[in-house]
Image (cartoon, rainbow, N blue to C red):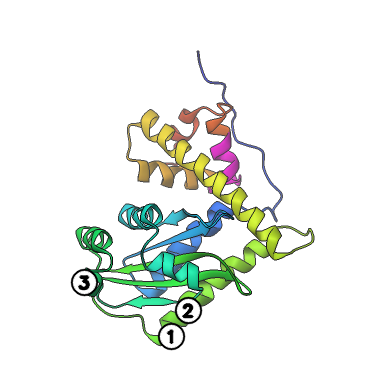
Amino acid sequence: MRVPVAVTPRRRPASGFDPLILFNRLVHTCRGPLEVDAAAVMADDGRGTLKTMAATEDGAAFIELLQMQTGRGPCMDCFRTGETRGIPDITAERDRWPRLVRALLDNGYRAVHTVPLRLRDRALGAVTLLDARVGNLSEGDAHLAQALADSAALSLMHWSTEPRRVDDVVTRVRSAIAAKAALEIAKGMIAAYGGIEVSEAGRRLIDYARRHRVSLADTAHALVSRTMDPTVVVGDPYGS
């Protein structure tokens, strides 16, 4: 049976907020000015478990997944303590995190720097910066990384005009995590229909949402709920 087609998901007001786009922009903005090779961000689901929200590279996403599964690593330490963590040479941590160090080296990363994603004194997650070169971030770059993470947290605070409390932000982060789960399913659907890599499917979804001025989260939910045909994205003449 043919999947029903919706031309686009419903449009949000111009002031509409899309947390998936926010996290995607955060990691790509970090990678550029800071001149690191990859960046990723994880957010707390409200129960102390971190979920990867965005990553610039598949290798960075795998590193975050490994830390999430084992509960160990610089990202986890950063989240628990709310403090930045710089590891200029990851090989120095072989005894502490043997699996993680091996995975980092296998993916071409030699240095790690993490900054907390925090609101006031509450940690909402952590941003991980990965570099193929040995060395730490300069003091200026470390401050810039924290400023970018703080700006993202403030954006979550001002998600809507409703009363804003830290607990409200935690609820919003949970909503963003649910949307991210739907996005991963949608990426798989697009990859299967288009015969393309999952990373390319993710890029096409982001491009589609941007061009049509619709929420990436709504686009993902429409695909997962079968109210939108994957071929609408795969066959978009501007998607390739």
Helix, strand or loop for the magenta stretch, by majority: helix
Residue indicated by mark 2: 144
- Residue 202 shows in this picture: yes
Circle 2: is it few (<14), some (14-19), or many (20+) Cα within 10 Å?
some
The residue positioned 46% from the left and 61% from the top of the image is 41
The local secondary structure at tag 1 comes to helix
The magenta span reads 210-221
Residue 206 position, x and y percent, is: 49, 47
Which of the 4 image quadrants contains residue 64?
bottom left
Which of the 4 image quadrants contains residue 133?
bottom left
Q: Relative to 197, is 130 above or below? A: below
Check residue 226 in the rendering and tell me which mark sits there, or answer none. Answer: none
Residue at the extreme bottom of the image, as rendered = 139
As shown in the figure, which amino acid type bears the numbered disc 1?
Answer: Gly
The residue positioned 43% from the left and 63% from the top of the image is 28
Q: Marks 3 and 2, how far apart in space?
A: 26 Å
